[in-house]
Each structure stands twice: as C-alpha cells, then as structure tokens.
Image (spheres, grey):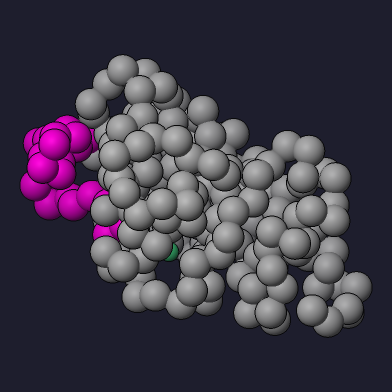
C-alpha cells in the first residue's frame, strides 16, 4: 500500500490535479498507531515507499520517526492526524487539488447538492460540506476539515460521515480503505464537476 501512495500521486499529477510538489497522502494500517505520510515539498512524480515518512500517533500528537532528518512530514500533518487519530481500521487520507472541483466551488456550486443530482457519485461517494477559504497547512484548515467530515468539532471520535469534502480555493480531502479508494471518490466528483462546468449552467 505504500507503493500505492506514490502511484496515486503520479496519477494525480498526470491528470493535472496537482503541480509537482502539491498534494499529500497518509495511511494507517489496522490497529496500528503508526501513520505513514508523504514528505513535505517532495516531488510527487518520484515518490516511492522509501520516501514515505513514519509518524507515531500519541495522545499528545505525534512523534516523527525517521532516519532521514532532511525530510519533514507533509505541511498538512495536522489535518491527516485529526482524520486518522482514533480510527482502528485501515484508512487512507488523500489531499489533492483537482481542477474542476475547485473551479466548481469557485463558481459557487454546492458540491453536496451537485453530487445528489448525479447517481454515479451519490451511489458510491458521500460528499460532505465544503470548508471555507482558510490558510493552507493551518490548524484552522485541519479543524474545519475534520468538522466537515464528522459534523462535530470534538476529535474524540473516528466516525467520518463522508468520503470527500471540498476546501474552497484549495482542493479536496478524501478517505478510503486504501489510497486508490480515496482516489476514486475524488475522480467521481471531479468528473461531474467537469460535466457541470462544461454545461455552461450557472449555480
Ligand atoms: Zn493543498
């Protein structure tokens, strides 16, 4: 599954959903307190298992456990930690900047309402409320993203009510049992956003 983290990033880059150093992925295996996460600022086109960072999740936060001290975990570490922290199963969290989803939000479309109109999304992907414009890598963005997924601000739960949420002027965050599951939620929503934007209809 660590290989899949790099494969998803390469696919996202080929699709134009990230520029070279954008995006991040984390992965927690079942009943494990170790979170694997992409390194900060790394070129995602050359991301391979040996580049993935390991952080230990503790009650106080996390401890980076890496021999390579030149690397740091993704700047969106807080967001990944909140979404992974209390989960006991296997979970991947993928954050990308998909063009048409961002454009649809920018044009004023409500992603939840849009998804409800298209069965190819609504049958398989639960779309949550979008978060407003917030500084990238901020704890505000991490908290707002967690709240959008759970409907609550309290972090003492692992029950995510949605598979994907939009982040205005920025991107999306999606979760799944593995990196490709999360990727598929993004792909479905991206596809209908492209359709809606091409239709010329206004929100
Ligand atoms: Zn981002």
Res. 56 in view: yes
In the image, residue 15 sits, relative to residue 10, either above or below, namely below
The percent coordinates of residue 173 (x first, y second) are 50, 53
Residue at 27 percent across and 52 percent down: it is: 77
- Residues 107 and 159: in front is 159
Assign the N terminus to one quadrant of the image: top left
Residue at 64 percent across and 73 percent down: it is: 105
Rendering quarter of residue 156: top left
Queried whether the magenta region covers residue 57, the answer comes back as yes
- Residues 120 and 194: in front is 120
The boundaries of the magenta stretch are 54-77
Q: Residue furthest top?
A: 31
In the image, residue 193 sits, relative to residue 84, either above or below, namely below
Res. 7 in view: no
Q: Is residue 139 left or right of residue 66?
A: right
The percent coordinates of residue 66 (x first, y second) are 13, 37
Assign the C terminus to one quadrant of the image: bottom right
In the image, residue 141 sits, relative to residue 108, either above or below, namely above
The percent coordinates of residue 89 (x first, y second) are 41, 22
Quadrant for ligand 1 reads bottom left
Q: Is residue 22 left or right of residue 39?
A: right
- The tally of labels here is 0
Queried whether the magenta region covers residue 167, the answer comes back as no
Residue at 73 percent across and 48 percent down: it is: 188
The percent coordinates of residue 72 (x first, y second) are 18, 52
Q: Is residue 28 left or right of residue 163?
A: left
Residue at 27 percent across and 21 percent down: it is: 32
């Amino acid at each position: 599954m660590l290989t899949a983290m790099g494969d998803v990033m390469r696919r996202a880059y080929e699709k134009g959903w990230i520029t070279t150093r954008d995006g991040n992925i984390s992965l927690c295996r079942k009943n494990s307190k170790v979170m694997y996460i992409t390194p900060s600022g790394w070129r995602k086109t050359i991301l391979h298992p040996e580049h993935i960072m390991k952080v230990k999740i503790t009650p106080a936060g996390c401890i980076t456990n890496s021999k390579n001290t030149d690397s740091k975990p993704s700047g969106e570490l807080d967001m990944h930690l909140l979404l992974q922290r209390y989960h006991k199963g296997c979970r991947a969290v993928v954050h990308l900047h998909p063009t048409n989803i961002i454009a649809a939000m920018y044009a004023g479309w409500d992603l939840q309402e849009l998804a409800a109109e298209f069965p190819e999304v609504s049958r398989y992907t639960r779309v949550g409320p979008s978060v407003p414009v917030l500084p990238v890598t901020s704890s505000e963005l991490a908290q707002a993203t967690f709240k959008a997924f759970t409907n609550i601000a309290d972090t003492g739960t692992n029950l995510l009510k949605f598979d994907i949420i939009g982040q205005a002027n920025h991107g999306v965050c999606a979760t799944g049992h593995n990196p490709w599951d999360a990727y598929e939620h993004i792909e479905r929503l991206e596809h209908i956003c492209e359709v809606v934007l091409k239709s010329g209809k206004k929100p």
